[in-house]
Structures are given as C-alpha cells and as structure tokens.
Amino acid sequence: MSRKSSSDDSVFNGVSLIIAAVFVLSLADAAVKYFSSPLPLWQLFLIVSCLSVPALAAWIGSRSKTARIGIASVRWIMIRSVLLLLMWVSYYSALPLIPLSVAAVAIYTTPIFIALISTRYAGEPLSPLGWAAVAIGFSGVALVLRPGAEAFSRAALLPVIGAVFYALAMVVTRRHCRDEHPLVLAFGLNIGFLVAAMIGGIASLMVSDVTAARAQFLLLHGSRLGGSNCFSSWVMPVP
C-alpha cells in the first residue's frame, strides 16, 4: 500500500474541507439536541443509517462502474468506525444534560488531543509555537468548563472523552486509512451506526424501566414516528 508523505499535503484544501465539515456537524449537533427529548440515541442512529447506508451503497455502486473503489484494510476501517462511534455516543449522551455551547467547547478540545497524540504516535512533532497554542486552547476550555467550580457538571466530561476518541480516530485515519476512498470510510461508519442501533434497540427491550430511566437518551424505548419507517415494527415498539 502506497503512503503519501507529508510534503504531498494541501494545507489550504484540507483546512477548507475541515471548516465545511465542522459547519455541517454543528447543524447535526443542533438537530440531535432538538430531537434528544422524544427520541433515544439508538433510534437516531437507526434513522440516519437507514437513510445513509442504502444511499452510500448506491453511490459506491455507481462510482465503481467508472472507477475501481478498493479497500486497503478492513481492520483499520473497523477500528476507525468504532472510535468514531464511541465519540458520537459520548458526545451525544451529554447533549440532553448540558447546554450545547458547553458541549461544543468540550468536544473541540479534539485538536489539542490530536496534537498530543500525533506528536507521540504519528511522528509529527509540534513546534514551540504549536505547544503554546495547545496550552492556550486548554486554558480556554478550562475557563469555560470551570472544573472544580460549584456549577461544574460531570456530564461536561463526556464530550471531552468523545474528543479523545475523535482524536484517536483522526490519527488512525491519517496513518492507516489515508489511501481509503472517502465513500468507503463513510459506508463503514454508517454500518457501525446500524449495528449500534440494533444493539441499542435490543438493550432497550431487555433492561428494566428503572435502568432505562437512569439513561433515557441511551436506553429509552423507541418512539413511533409518523408514517412508515424502517424496522418500526421491531425496534420502535408502542408503549
């Protein structure tokens, strides 16, 4: 498998794509915050995967007719998908408990963890200016979250945990999935959403009402949506 060197990087294009992706993710975060009251997390995963998996499969199929789309490493795609899935679970679990602005500040500690992890494991050392930026960023996050203050909520640590998983996923993407097609990576992640939704749906039917009440956004029974929706007769029971 060929590996591109850092000299092949296009910083401007990469930063532009990151900004666009963060904007889209911010819209998704607001949507999850809005729907987190009537719908449990596993059901949101189910809805997303039911829409995205067929669409991505059709897109990959259409692209494969004109260009070969291969898979370099199934193992690293799975590891990346699991890390991102853990990130979403950690982050989204906090949204019903803390303000979205606080959750956003906490999750965007990701660049700090990426810098630290990539320095240790990816062989991309930081300059003194880079370390200064990390310190300033960490100080800003601590100022907003105010750990140790009376108003501090332990739920604010969930997005920070998610940021660690996100940083690990980004390092894995750069180190081991750089030659994978973006459609393949997206398809693998959404398959992970589908599996997580099925596990969550089964767990919500098996746990007691007391346990479900303690983690409503994770284990609450599914809500029936208006109209028809996939798997509604199995994973979206009517109370």
Image: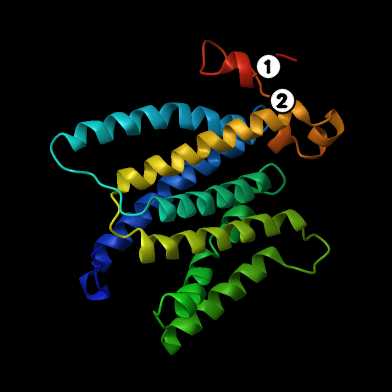
Q: Residue at x 55, y 18 (%)?
A: 231
- Secondary structure beneath dot 2 equals loop
* Precedes in sequence: disc 1 or disc 2: 2
Residue 93 horizontal/vertical position (percent): 66, 45
When asked about the image quadrant of residue 164, the answer is: bottom right
Q: Is residue 163 visible?
A: yes
Kind of residue at disc 2: His
Residue 137 x/y as whole percent: 54, 73
| Mark 2, residue position | 221
Residue 100: x percent and y percent?
Answer: 61, 48
Q: Residue at x 37, y 62 (%)?
A: 176
C-alpha span from label 1 to label 2:
7 Å
Is residue 35 visible to us here?
no
Q: Which residue is tagged 1?
A: 237
Dot 1: element = loop
User: What sort of colour scheme is used for the picture?
Assistant: rainbow
Q: Is residue 48 left or right of residue 1?
A: right
Marks 1/2 in contact by CB < 8 Å: the verdict is yes
Mark 2, other Cα within 10 Å: few <14 / some 14–19 / many ≥20? many
